[in-house]
Amino acid sequence: MMKDWCVRALSRDSARRQSDGHAESNNPLCHLMPRLKLPALREFKRCFLLLAVLPFSSNATGSNYSAIALAELARAQQVLLDAHPAVALKTDRSFNDWIVRGYDEAEKLAMRAANAPQILAAVRYYLSGFRDGHVAVWDPNASSKTMWAGWTAQWRSGEWRVVRAASGWPTTLPEKGAILIACDGLKPSEYIDTHIAPFVDRRTGLESVLDRLALLLSNRIPRDGIWETEKPYSCTFESNGETREYRLDWKASDAGIYSSNKQRPRMGVEPWGKNRYWIYAQQFLSSDLEKNEMEDAISAILSVPAKADVVVFDARGNNGGSSLFGYQMLAALMRRDTPNLESGAQAWWRPSRISVDWFARLARDELARAGPQSVRYRKISEMEKFLKEAHQKSGPDVLVSDGAIEGSQYPSPPEGDSFKGRVVLLTDKNCASACLDFSDLVLAVPGALHVGEATSADSDYLDIAVVDLPSGLQIAVPQKVWIGRSRKANEPLIPEHLFGGDIHDTPSLRAWLEPLL
């Protein structure tokens, strides 16, 4: 009865808004929902989920888009309520404030959604408010067609500087190195804070985030869709003491997107000079690894002589994945001297149905990738069993410590002689999540040296599950929380030696690193 009423009411409301020519909702239910207590809110939202089957079709009306956006927003909040550890922990005031207040703000946007990108933008507005890189939503089927204004600016040494400028552009462009002063009358930081960050990532204190946000000043990237459809019309630059305004000429092109992941080497080891070794550790995502790539890399590390002088772990391009891979790489080198971190910290998991299903999916994928002999497959299966039993015993709202798992989450390190030389960690500003766990581990080796760029950062909530939303969007939600971790939430790791050049220029970087050893 309730569901039927919802569908009829929203259908009448959609027809009325279509005939009136605007997308504002007069349906009293839509305005009532944010003010309801969470248990009642869950019941009322169920009617919106019925509308999520509406497709992202090119001929959908504005009212259809707003209905889909409302349904996706409701489902996104429900995923957080069902699976996020903060809901069970109850002590994170900022999270528990935003989960309701942020929904209220995002719902007002969702009611005005007039196209598919604005559906995504409305949900992203909500999730970005948690200021957590592990809470995110994206469109896995986003178009690859990008628009570029012919130049790209990034935050460099306290200024917005042009780092890339096209040749042969139809209109005059600022030169490389020019300082960006303003776009459409707003300072770059103001434009980003107003039009970009709320729909992508609000952690503007991190340089990795600033780089990503700054791309959207002069690039339009479907995977990072924002609410406004209008692009900046003109921007002002300073170069050689002169200030000049340029009208932006937008063209279909992806040349302005600055990516560190192009042509990455395979995971593994290569000699670097005399008695030194360079270990590539670019990413820990099993889905992106070639068959046996990680296993071959670990075998190669096991062959590094224990008496070598220097080993460099190159984590450029690594923004996370499975922390087990990072542990296995270091353990293959350090053997019995592998550090044991966080003895005073504990990881607590929320045993939700979402988490149980997610680990079952991970186990199937790892079994297909590496077979039943895979260490990672065994550990994933153990975690699935642990969470399933906790879910059945205490329900989804009682956090459980993974210290209760029989044996360590990590396997014992290999036998053999430990490496005795100098360990160097090389990071870029995109190092996050499992890359940060790996960095913590490497830097715990006595005498380890950290070089490169300051890392990104993460919150105390980690280990995401990915949930499919009805429209095809996907949402990431953390499953565990660290209590007592030494590295603070959203705190980057700062190298002892910062590299000021192009972090992707390996020959220059190696020449710079030589005298530091």
Image (cartoon, grey):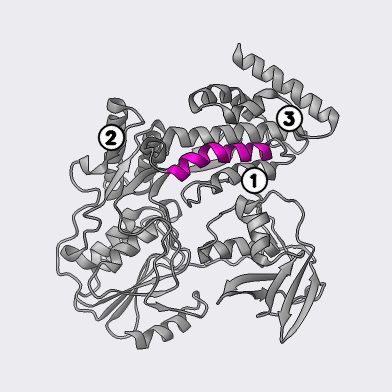
Residue 121 percent coordinates (x, y): 64, 45
Q: Amino acid at mark 2?
A: Lys
The disc, 3 or 1, on the residue closer to the chain's N-terminal end is 3
Gap between marks 2 and 1, in whole Å? Answer: 37 Å
Residue under pointer 1 = 121
Residue hosting label 3? 25
Please give the name of the residue rendered at 35% of the width and 46% of the height, measured from the top-left corner.
481
Residue 139 screen position, x and y as percent = 59, 45
Q: Disc 2 marks which residue?
A: 385
Label 1, secondary structure: give it.
helix
Instruction: Name which residue type carries label 3.
Output: Ser
Residue 105 among those drawn in magenta: yes
Say which residue appears at 31% left-offset and 84% top-offset.
517
50 displayed left or right of 185 = left
For discs 2 and 1, the disc positioned in front in the rendered view: 1
Q: 412 or 248: nearer the eye?
A: 248
Whether residue 509 is situated above or below residue 434 in the rendered picture: below
Mark 3 and mark 1: Cα distance apart in space: 18 Å
Could you tell me residue 253's position as x and y percent?
A: 71, 63
* Of the image marks 2 and 3, the number of the one nearer the N terminus: 3
